[in-house]
Image (tube, grey):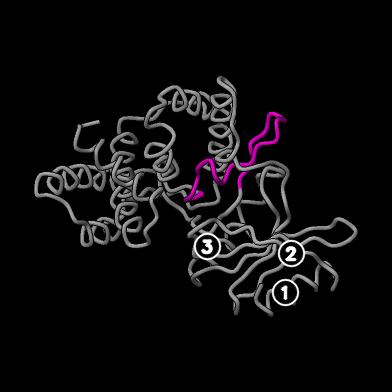
Amino acid sequence: MPGPLAALVTSVLGPDVDVWSRSWPGAASRVWEARAPNGAAVFAKVHSTPKFHRREVAAYESWVTLLGEDTPRLLACDSALPGILVTPLPGVPVKFQPLPPGQDAEVHALAGALARRIHDTAICPAATASALPSAYVLKHLGRARLTDADLSRAQAVLVAAAQVTLPMVPTHGDFQPRNWLYNNDSRVRVIDFERAEPGASVRDFRLLVNGPWQERPDLREAFFDGYGRSLTTDEEIALAGWVVLDALDSAHWGAKDNDAEVLARGLAGLAQLRNGR
């Protein structure tokens, strides 16, 4: 743990603490768990960029507090690191839990209900905007290595999505099972807000379409049962664009960072595009 972050931890917990690395494999931002002899604990994080730091702090200081015990609380931050300390939450990431049949659908329903609460916190100005910012489209297409046919398909989906306008709401930005905590208590909690920003609500579904929902449409159905409504036609068009962007992004970074899991997600998403799914 970097010295300045360790000093921030001791300012909250005292000097005698045990520390464990809790960073995701391959993640640019680094995370530690620190625990004092009396059992008090914090999670400490150094963000990989000032942008991620600003996003996470802004989320914690505004709409995250409205979600109650289902999210951590910000204890301290230091923009010079840039880093934060947050409270721990009960539960284990869903990604690493072997849930029995039926329970996985229940967890997705609970996650859907939590996503709806995030999107309904209503701290954004009452405004609509393009569901898919053109800067995102240009960035991802500019570095994509696609066949002419795949590029044509991707462009068609992205152009259609960029023409849709949707309400801007708080979005988590990395809403997926590795950031969902479950503790067999009929609750799903969520962590990691460094990608949070105002946007179209469907931004929070792209990692699920390109992840656990690919071979499990029942999980998607359970999620939207929990969400409380199905998507509108415009939202489906916008979501298709976000799914393509995620596939392009995952294929790029998976190959660049030699991350087999991320690369597989990107290639699977591009295969869905190719097959018209």
Numbered range of the magenta stretch: 172-190
Q: Return the x and y of residue 246 as percentages of the image width and height.
A: 34, 48
Question: Which sits earlier in the primary sequence, circle 2 or circle 1?
Answer: 1
Q: Nearer the viewer, residue 164 or 250?
A: 250
Disc 2 to disc 3, C-alpha distance: 26 Å
Identify the secondary structure beneath mark 1. Answer: helix
Q: Which label sits in the foreground, 3 or 1?
A: 1
Callout 2, which amino acid? Val
Q: Are the two marked residues, 3 and 1, in contact with CB atoms closer than 8 angstroms?
A: no
Quadrant holding the N terminus: bottom right
* Residue found at the very far left of the displayed protein: 148
* Residue found at the very far top of the displayed protein: 102
Disc 2 to disc 1, C-alpha distance: 10 Å
User: Dot 3 surroundings within 10 Å: few (below 14), some, or many (20 or more)?
Assistant: some
Question: Which sits earlier in the primary sequence, circle 3 or circle 1?
Answer: 1
Q: Name the residue under label 1.
A: 6
Quarter location, residue 211:
top left
Q: Mark 2 points at which residue?
A: 19
Q: Nearer the viewer, residue 68 or 83?
A: 83
Image position of 37 (left or right of 34): right
Callout 3, which amino acid? Arg
User: Dot 1 surroundings within 10 Å: few (below 14), some, or many (20 or more)?
Assistant: some
Callout 1, which amino acid? Ala
Q: Are the two marked residues, 2 and 1, in contact with CB atoms closer than 8 angstroms?
A: yes
Image position of 255 (left or right of 188): left
Residue drawn at (39%, 42%) of the image = 206
Q: Return the x and y of residue 152 as percentages of the image width and height.
A: 12, 46
Q: Which of 248 and 228 is in front in this view?
A: 248
Q: Name the residue under label 3.
A: 55
